[in-house]
Image (cartoon, grey):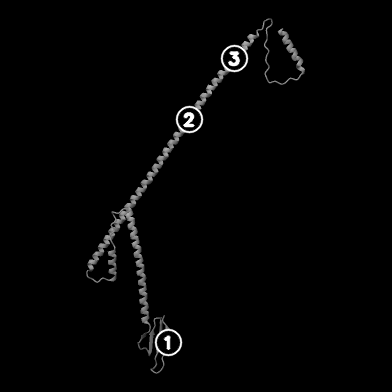
Amino acid sequence: CINNLHCSRFTGESQDDSKPKPKTFAPPIAVPKIPEGDKVDFDDIHRKRQEKDLTELQSLIEAHFIQRKKDEQELIALVNRIEKRRAERAEQVRIRTEQEKERQARVAEEKERKELEEARKKQDDDIKKKKALTNMTQQYGGVQQRQDGKRGAKKQTEREKKKKILADRRKALNIDHLSEDKVKEKANELWQWLMTLEAEKFDLSEQLKRQKYDRQRKRQGQGQGEIDTTPSAGVLRLKMSCNIDINVHINNKTAPATAGIRHRQ
């Protein structure tokens, strides 16, 4: 019966050869050989096939879980590496930040040290200048006092009066105990006082120039019409202030006088 089924199957396939068959990509399945004369147990075949399929499925499931576990381990390792790298990066940033803060602190400290050193040097220079100026003022005042003592009761000239007035005006600064702001105020006062003296000096200089000019004009006005009475062949010479000589020739008392004008070189 089985042989008849196979025969009819193969005969049916041969009959259908004339019809076009669709192309299939599935591999051909080998038909199991059935021994002749034995009874075929289809239930046993089906059971064995199910067992085989179950075994293959279990193998696939085990392989899947093994691969999944491996992937999970790799993922955990990757996450750990990322976290470790992130922590290392944060530590590097923290170290660099601390180093930058230390560098800025050193720069600020060095700048402050230089500023303090410059301020100290400037203060020392100011103290030295103040002492030198004080010594010069005291020395000049002592010299002036000695000169005034030597003169005694001598009559003071205008120059001596001027020197005495200047000496009286000069006073010791006495600024060693003052602070920097007070010294600046004192320097400003001295500067204003110096400007006042310069203005007075300029006014006095202009006044002196004006007086000299007025005296010169007065002498010129008095010198006009000066007569040279030295007898020289009956000639009267008038010396004018404008560099002109006027010679008046007098021949006799009744004759009119003739005059000649000559510019002096």
Identify which residue, 97 or 140, lies in the foreground. Answer: 97
Dot 3 or dot 2: first in sequence order is 3
Q: What residue type is labelled 2?
A: Glu
Residue at 37% across, 78% down: 217
Question: How far is disc 3 from disc 2 in space, using C-alphas?
Answer: 42 Å
Say which mark, if any, is on residue 166: none
Mark 1 or 3, closer to the camera = 3
Q: Residues within 10 Å of mark 3 (few under 14, many from 20)?
A: few
Residue position marked by numbered label 1 in the rendering: 260
Q: What residue type is labelled 3?
A: Leu
Q: Is mark 2 on a helix, strand or loop?
A: helix
Q: Where is residue 226 in the image (x, y as percent from the top left)?
A: 36, 84
Which x, y percent locates residue 38? 67, 5
Look at mark 2 in the image and give the residue it sits on.
Answer: 83
Q: Nearer the viewer's eye, disc 3 or disc 2?
A: 3
Quadrant assignment for the N terminus = top right
Disc 2 versus disc 1: distance between alpha carbons?
127 Å
Residue 228 found in image quarter: bottom left
Mark 2 or 1, nearer chain start:
2
Question: Callout 1 environment at 10 Å: few (<14), some (14 to 19), or many (20+)?
Answer: few
